[in-house]
Image: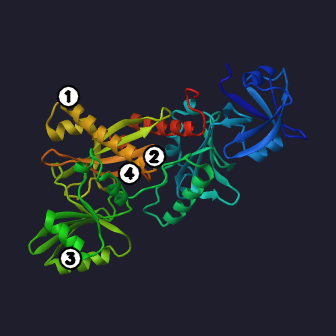
Amino acid sequence: MIRRVKIISESSASACLTAHPQTLAHLNLEKGEQVTLVFGNVYEEVTLALDPDLDLNMLRVCSDTLSHLHLPTTVEYEVKRQGNSLIIGPFIGVLAAVSDNQLENNENYLASFTANYEQIGGALLIFSLEGVDPGSQTIQGWIFNPTYNRWEKGTYAYPAAILSIVEVSLTDKWNLFQELSTHFYQTLGPRIFNYPIFDKWEMYRWLRRHPNLKHHLPETVLLNDSSDVKRMLKKYGKIFIKPVVGRLGAGVIEATFDRPKVIVKTRVYGQNIKHIFADHKRFISYLQTVTASEKYLIQQAIPLLTLKGRVIDFRLTLVKDDTNQWANIGLFARYGAKRSIISNITSGGYAEWGKKGLKQTLDINRRKANQWNNKMTMIARHAALELEKRGIHCANLGFDLAIDKNKKLWLIEINNQNPDHFIAVVAGRTDKFLQARSANLLYAKRLAGFPRNGT
């Protein structure tokens, strides 16, 4: 059985592909046939030739064709016939950074993509936003060379499928990211994920009427004017004011109504900051200043469970692999910095395995912890399926869930731009981090036309 092939270059005056007779027979092809050789988003017509001395797992392709396809010969490929096309792959791209500097010499980060390379195979391309040239439809990035276990920089054609995990919401490259994501979608079709990216407000609008989700969502409104803030403060006593697009707790403001005062807590440069305003008017004046540069929303504050002065919430990793089914890879408990209004581990918090956190914070046994985990998974799956109905191509999500002091479960946010499953490493479960990474790549392999089961 021919599982993977090695491609070698040959000098030839015409576009051709040479293979052993049994290899062509395996692909149901014959000598002299003309087929379209496809690699990623590029193709070229070639004429088939035979060489009985060639190894069964080897294809010889003329150098001009290899150059046109930008096809690296340092990896082994699967080959698939589709009509009159011969597809070489998988060719998977990972949009992983804003700039090349973030990827160069970052061996530990890059290694996470190759832990399960044997199952993936083919060309694996890591690249940044600045490496994309839409005009020539080429990418300057790094292809993994499994022989020498290293990444090699070069210029390549667009891949057959793209996993996007670049973090741009806290940079000035948001517009560039949106433009390139749309460009990739227009070029590759539904073979880029997650796409399109949705924000906190869109999530709330889409899910708030879902029968299985609406009771698990904190009330949320857009911040349009001061009356919105006053109404929500009067109704709930405590609210969160958050950027519509944002991550890692950046820009989050907690406001508590303590008649007639308004007490504000926020976090700046890793430090807890507290303001006390004598009345609404002074508070609104402050709020107009800090929210002037971007869109914000107002969210009902949930009285979260705490442990020794730390707020607690949970991150659930929900991904697809090449089976195209949603799976919970892991649940993790997050403990915020002491007296912080957010639970992010980047702001002084820490993480642990989710079921352990459930047992500790709820004082329950393993069976009850499993029940909570199953309930959280069910909510996450309902939400993921609803997102897909809305036209979101997502296969890599991070759900922020919380339990209040009355033991009610809440869905706070869905991370889709870059769910960043590194929380698993912080919690001491590197295996789960690598499992999520592997699932992402196997799903991309499916999109590229090479699922493991061959269908």
Q: CA distance from mark 2 to mark 4?
A: 11 Å
Q: CA distance from mark 1 to mark 4?
A: 28 Å
Q: Secondary structure at mark 2?
A: loop
Q: Give me the disc on residue 415.
A: 4
Mark 3 to mark 4 CA distance (whole Å): 30 Å
Horizontal placement of 108 versus 262: left or right?
A: right
Note whether 184 is above or below 92 in the view shown: below
Q: According to the image, label 3 marks what residue? A: 283
Which residue bears the numbered disc 2?
394
Mark 4: few/some/many CA within 10 Å (<14, 14-19, 20+): many
Q: Residue at x 52, y 32 (%)?
A: 116
Would you name the residue on which mark 1 appears?
A: 367
Labels 3 and 4: the sequence-earlier one: 3
Q: Neighbour class for label 3 at 10 Å: few (<14), some, many (≥20)?
A: some
For marks 2 and 3, give the CA distance: 39 Å
Eye-nearest disc, 1 or 2: 2
**Is label 4 in a helix, a strand or a loop?**
strand
Residue type marked 4: Asn
Amino acid type of disc 2? Cys
Res. 115 mark = none
Mark 1 nearby-residue class (10 Å; few <14, some 14–19, many ≥20): few
User: With 361 as the anchor, is 190 left or right in this view?
Assistant: right
- Residue 50 horizontal/vertical position (percent): 85, 25
